[in-house]
Image: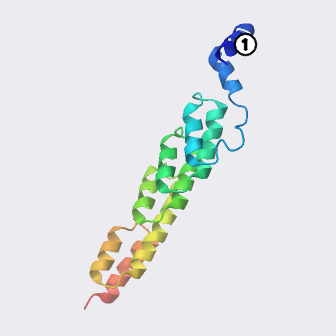
Amino acid sequence: MSDKAERIAGLLGITVTKVRDVLETVPFPPGSMDTVEQALKAFHNAPSDSEARRLALEKWIALCATIEQAREAFRNTPHDSEVRRLTLEKWITLCATIEQAREAFNNAPYGSEIQEFAFKKWNELSLAEVEAANTIEQIRKAFNNTPNSSEARRLAILKIEELMPD
């Protein structure tokens, strides 16, 4: 394809890179991106800023099934892009621990809707920890894991107040 791309570029008076970008945006063959690994390979093999790279990234995000996969995809998304927001949304959806939700919250743009989504997930996971806590020490630990100004934090204070001797 290299010779052909060069001839097309010469004929049209454009760069070979532009020709390759166009030629590589054809839909991926069936079965070529059925796994995260295949989508990741397609992403890394596609030219920067090409439609093929964008499509591979979208497929990669859709296939993410673990926090680790979502984090890796997030690190490869352009800052301030819709695809970055979608990747972070996928990451938040996959969060199963307070630490994961806190990390996603800290990676979200300040004051954004996606940060609010991360806050809700963090609060939800923190509420479960606070509700399961039965001793002052357990509640204190749970309190330290709650987001500021959250329902989980308020509940932790109320639970400690109930258990604290007069």
Q: Quadrant of the N terminus?
A: top right
Placement of 31 over or under 114, stated as above or below: above
Q: Nearer the viewer, residue 15 or 106?
A: 15
Q: Position of residue 12 (x, y in %)?
A: 74, 11
Q: Nearer the viewer, residue 98 or 60?
A: 60
Instruction: Please tell me which residue lies in front, 21 or 79.
Output: 21
- Give 34 or 61, whichever is nearer the viewer: 34
The residue where tag 1 is placed is 8
Q: Is residue 142 above or below residue 63?
A: below
Which residue appears at 45% of the width and 50% of the height? Answer: 107
Query: Looking at the picture, which amino acid does disc 1 mark?
Result: Ile
Quadrant of the image containing the C terminus: bottom left
Vertical placement of 44 versus 39: above or below?
A: above
Q: Position of residue 96 (x, y in %)?
A: 47, 65
Question: For the residue carrying disc 1, how many other residues have a C-alpha within 10 Å: few (<14), some (14-19), or many (20+)?
Answer: some
Which residue is at 63% across, 29% downward? 50
Which quadrant would residue 80 be assigned to in this image? top right
User: For this view, does 55 lie left or right of residue 79?
Assistant: right
Residue 91's x, y, as percent? 52, 55
The single residue placed furthest to the left in the displayed view is 166
